[in-house]
Structure formats: structure tokens, C-alpha cells
Amino acid sequence: MLVAACQYMKKQNRCMGRFGALLGNTLFVMLHTIGCEADEPYPPPISEQPTTGGGHTTSEEPSSLKEPVLPPVSGGTLLITDGGMRAVASDPDVDVIWTARLDAGVREHVIELQKGDEPGRLVESSDGKVHVALRGAGEIATIDPAVGELIRRTAVCQMARGLEYDAASDQVAVGCAEGKIVVINAQSGAITKSLSVEPDIRDVFFLGDQFVVTTLRSAELISFDGNGHEIDRAKPPPLLRFDGTAERWFSPAVAWRTIRMPDGTFLMVHQGERSEVIDLESQQDYGSHCSGIMYTGFTRFVPTEGGQIDDPLPGTYTIGEALPVDLLIYDAGKELAVAAAGGRTIIRHLVANLSDPGFFCDALGAESNGMPVGLGESNGEIIVLLRDPPFIAAVNSNLRIDLGLPATNAGHALFHSAPNGVLACASCHPEGREDGHVWNFSTMGARRSQSLRGGVQATLPLNWDGGMADIHAIVADVFVKRLGGSPPTADEEKSLVDWINALPRLTPLRNPQDDAALRGKKIFESAEAGCNTCHSGEHFTNNQNEDVGLGGALQVPSLLGVAWRTPLMHSGCAKTLADRFDPNCGGANHGHTDQLSAHELADLIAYLESL
């Protein structure tokens, strides 16, 4: 069977290798090899062994019961401690921190948090304590994993994301999405430094007395001095590659995870998204394993003395790894593994191959039997944290530790699944937001991805031209037609609508009571400016198509969270909020703001930042 499959793939000129079709919703698991040749044995899937620890139900609840509202998948939520013998895992689905003994194969402790805390990244300090970013609470939870005790909670910012521990100073750096770097003492929790930088921070690192952060949507690596002043920035280079029919340009986007390599360089796993025209009538053009509109990329950055960042080393793009939410270097730095949540696979690469520029089509996939969201290493073995249901398991052995009852939501599962193995809804809408990418569609032209947060049902119809009446139309056109997914059931689709509509808006980047924001509010609501003629109501939209002088009528977007969404406008021409007020970008009929002074325009922008 494998021989026949391989011969078929060769005939189709695809660089997919041996594959197995998994039952149910588990998607393709593949050994990707150029020309379908593989010398190493395919590793066995994570075995479905009898579980230890708490049990879980196998019965399905009636569809009429209300599903839990789960946060979007973010990843990077597993930490291996105690010489590889203990695993500590964040579970944002149920707001707990699990600990498990890998040597005994049992769940150890359950540390319950507050509802909505959404635990994320974890780091261990030299005293064995573990510090956990509480994404929903903006706090750092410090725990003792040996006894399962919550020691303290430290309020640090609004949206805690990245963490790193520095043993020399015994401090923890926290990267906050709203644009802060906060440093706390690992022993006391006291804040020793708080710096204001730019928003959308994902991961954070110490660099002597300087700092390095990554941004989620723009996939940039930025260095700052100890006072928060920018030193340098870099991002993965665009990639030109041949996809079997033509050469295509891909732009970097969505840096899901960045880690520090043993040699001190930084390795980022990110998406590569097509810059050229996409044929919406071609499912093959939209997405398949060796051609399509999106790939997973690896880029290494080299920091130098003084915080400068050398030009990135040549990037490598691979295939089929939808939602690469975590990254692991193991085997003494020789190999790396990626947790591909969308495809429910673990992909492995040789680190040495990252120095070879261009398309890299040699990845060893292992069935995960669940959605992988965190990776770690224990004595040379890859340990993976799975969700839905929650397990800690080893890729190449029978270790499988049941963590507890699963928190399931059919809409959440649909949003994060990749029917073609390459692309999920969450690929273009990470964390329910948008990837900041401007797509070029054959029948529409330039279209920037739109955010789904803040109650999208109140903004119907959807898409920039208003051509999609509701999410049902989006599912039929995108998930089924373009991605090749199976039509969801009525219950699954309702769950998807409910889950998306429950996504909260992001915390405003400016306090609404800020003096400038209050002055800007008066300008926004004035008849002279005319902003709320179209941007009206609770969601700041009249749900209509309007022509602002850019050659056609388009939907009036909601302004909730608008400061998070640059570049703005359907074409992405506004790199900043200020750029939107350039008539060549924002349109000559887009309100009446030409008469505003520079101070008044700054106040209006301040108000937009407060939404």
C-alpha cells in the first residue's frame, strides 16, 4: 500500500512521502521525503495505552448542552523539570496547572487557578520554582511543582505572554502583548523594571542588560536597551520558491514560537504567506501539501555585541505544518521538533539542514492522537502535551499520562483544524485575530485579513465587500470549497459561530480616560468630522458598504481594537493609524478630517487607540 501511494505521489510530482490516513478528525501524518525516499524507519505513533491518573469520559454530551468557551490555541505550555523526571503543564482550557511524574507515568498534582486566568508559558528558576504567565489575568503565578502549591501571584501587566529566566540575576523577564517588558525578582516577585515598547509582543529574552522580543503578527525580532530604546530589528526574508507550477513569493508572518539555540542564536518558527495572486477557483492553488498559499518557515537570527542583529540566516520553509505553536531543540542540539496543532502532528527536522536555504521537504511526522500544544525533552525522548483530551505523552514510547477530563468545544476544534494539512482558520486568524497579511485574490484584488474578535455577529455581512452574509457562507466558501474540508454538521457550525462570537475584544492600547483620548472622542463624535456617520453604535459600524473614494464601496469595519490591526484599510496601505488619514490611502471621502490641526489629529488617533 505504501509503495503504491509513493508511486502515485511521484507521478503527481509532489514531495509528499509515505503517509497514513488516520481515523476520525485526526489528519494526515506523513514522512515527508524528497522523491519519496526514506532511510530511517517511520516511528510508531503514540500508543493508545491504558491510561494512568485521572480517567476521562468517552460518552458524548447532547448537543443541546452549552459548551465551555475555550481560549484560542497559543502553545508553548509544557516545561520539563527535575532532571527530566517531572512535567509541568499549563492548561488554559480549564485554568489549571498540571504536574506529572514521567519516571512513574502518573499525574502528580493539580493546581487550580481562577476562571479566566488562561495559564501559558512557563520557566523554572534555580530554586526549582516554576513561574507561569497568566495570559488572561496579566499576572505571573509562582508555584512549587514538588508539592503542588501556588506560592504567589504577581500582577505585571495586562496581557502577559513570553517568559525567560536569567540565572545570573535570578530574575524573570515577562513580555506583555500590549507593549511592555517587565522584570521581576524570582524570589520575591518584586518588579525591578518595567519598560514600555511596541505592542504585539510574543516571546522575550535577556541579552545581558538588554532585551530581545518577538512580535506575533509581523514576525519581527527586536532588541532594546535597558531603558526600552530600540537598538535593532530584523525579520525573516521573503522567499521565492517553485511550487510545482511556477515560482511564488512568500512573505513572513505570525511568529508562533521563538527559542534560544544552544549557540546563542534565536530560532523562530513562523508562517510564510503568498504575496502573489491566488486563484480562488483552484483548490490546489489555495492549499495542498506541496503547493498553496502558506508554509511553515524557520529563521535563525544572530545577535551581536551591542544588541545589533545580523541579517537573518537563509530561511527554510517546509510543508504541511499548520499552526506550529511550539518548538523544541533536543538530542544535544542536533534535532528540532515542531508541535503542529492544526495537523495534529509532531514534525522533526535536523538542525544542520537549517543552514541550507530554500525549500526543505524532509520532515519526520509522528501521529499525536490529539492536538499537540507543548513540547519538552526527557532523557532524549520528545515529550508532548496534548489537548482535547489532555495528555502528556512520549512520541516514541508507551508513556501516556491522562491529565483529566477534556474540555471540548466543537467550534474551537473546527477553527483550529487543517483539512488540507496546511491551513486552518487559525492560520490567518491566530488567537482569533488576524495575521496582518494583505492577500491578493484573483476575483477581489488586495484584501487584508480581518480580526474576528469583539462580537463578529454584530458586524454582518462579512468580508470587505460584504459578499458573505454570515459565517455559514464563510464556512461553505473557505473551509469546504477552498480548503477541501468536510461540511460541518449544523451543531458543529452553530458551535463555531458561538465560539467566534464569544471572542472578546483585545484590551485597548490606551486608557479610555486618557485626556487625549477624551478630547479625541469629542472630535470623533462631532458633525464636522463625521466619523460616527458610518462608524456608529456599540461596534462602531453601520454594517453597510460605503465608498470612501477608493474606487468602490466596501464594508465599514468595526473600530473595536483597531489600534491592534495595522496595517489598516482593505489594501493594508496604512502602516499606522496616522497613515489612514492620508487621502491617498484612506480615501478623499473618508470623513472630514483635512481641517484638523496636528494636535487634533493626534487626539483623534488617541481615541482610536482607546477603543
Image (cartoon, rainbow, N blue to C red):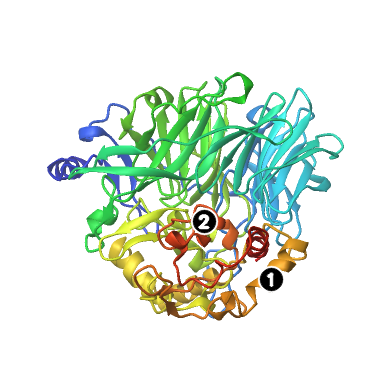
Q: Position of residue 442 (x, y in %)?
A: 25, 61
Local crowd size for mark 1, using a 10 Å CA cut-off: few (<14), some (14–19), many (≥20) = some
Could you say which is closer to the camera, residue 473 or residue 211? 211
Please state which amino acid type lies under the numbered disc 1.
Answer: Lys
Q: From the viewer's side, name the closer residue of 42 and 88.
A: 88
Q: Earlier in the sequence, mark 2 or mark 1?
A: 1
Please say if 227 is above or below 610: above
Q: Is residue 236 left or right of residue 66?
A: left
Q: Which mark is residue 579?
A: 2
The residue sitting at 26% across, 40% down in the picture is 18
Q: Which circle marks residue 96 in the picture?
A: none
The residue positioned 26% from the left and 62% from the top of the image is 280
Camera-nearest residue between 103 and 528: 528
Q: What residue is drawn where x is 51% and y is 60%? A: 580
Which quadrant would the N terminus be assigned to in this image? top left
Report x, y in % for residue 74. Answer: 56, 51
* Residue behind mark 1: 521
Q: Secondary structure at mark 2?
A: helix
Q: Nearer the viewer, residue 594 or 60?
A: 594
